[in-house]
Amino acid sequence: MTSRIEARFEKCRAEGRAALVTYVMAGDPDLETSFEIMRSLPKAGADIVEFGMPFTDPMADGPAIQAAGLRSLKGGQNTVKTLDLVRRFRKEDGETPIILMGYFNPIYVYGVERFLTDAKEAGVDGLIVVDLPPEEDDELCLPALKAGLAFIRLATPTTDDKRLPAVLANTAGFVYYVSITGITGAATPDFGQVSTAVERIKRHTPLPVVVGFGVKNGAHAAAIAKGADGVVVGSALINALKGTLDSDERATSRTVEAVTTLVKDLSEGVRSVSKRAAA
């Protein structure tokens, strides 16, 4: 049976383009606004939705996503509420893949077996857990795969050919290439180097390779789309959201629209690059 993730990449390939993967933080800036943003993303052009699970010690995240996580936690967001948001989304949309991204601690506290059961039931398609290396696959990766959830691994500019097979061994869904060393949203990637890196990873795996970290606008998205199967955008969307909040960091009438406007620009950038000629 084809998974939602596989079906979405097949659809994008059939359309001769890369996929747009959008990241937003669950519960930011509040539960209802977060849901309105989530349900608006596919309509604005997102192909896959990554939903951040807030955590108090997000070591791989830059200031924008860290602040989003803190806003979310301040509003009372937790794993139960995040899964509930996914359930609500699934009542309207049965096709858009949903990836939960975050850290192992909240999953461990929730209980791994319980989490995997509840996530699958809610309609989650895959997990990105940034602080679990391949050496710890028994903790979550292998149980997730057994439960029917893709476990998506990160590769970085420092992942050499010797390390890459270990990183890819139990990866499913797609490979997430982090285009810069360091934290999220910190710098703009070298687009030429990104294409070379994607080609190298593709020699080791048949999975789609998506690229994230540092993509800020439609032009960046188009540049990445030339060499990758997908483009991930997170910090730029969080910054767009943050720019609309009031002095108490609450949502305003402009919050959802600010995010969807940027997603439309990113979507246009991705769709401006035809991959049919290269196929």
Image (cartoon, rainbow, N blue to C red):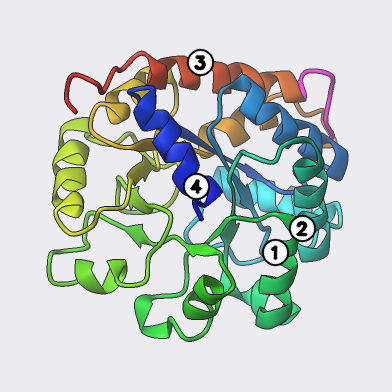
Number of numbered labels in the structure image: 4
Mark 4 — residue?
A: 5
Q: Residue at x 33, y 23 (%)?
A: 16
Label number found at residue 83 = 2
The three-letter code of the residue at mark 3 reads Asp
Magenta-highlighted residues: 250-255
Rendered location of residue 114, percent (x, y):
74, 78
- Gap in angstroms between the C-alphas marked 1 and 4: 15 Å
Q: Which residue is drawn at 70% across and 64% down?
A: 119
Mark 3 — residue?
A: 265
Relative height, residue 140 to residue 85 (above, below): below
247 with respect to 103 (left or right): right
113 with respect to 46 (left or right): right
Q: Residue at x 76, y 64 (%)?
A: 79
Residue 49's image quarter?
top right
The three-letter code of the residue at mark 1 reads Ala
- Gap in angstroms between the C-alphas marked 3 and 2: 29 Å
| Label 3 vs 2, first from the N-terminus | 2
- Labels 4 & 2 near each other (Cβ < 8 A): no
Can residue 73 be seen here? The reply is no
Residue 250's image quarter?
top right
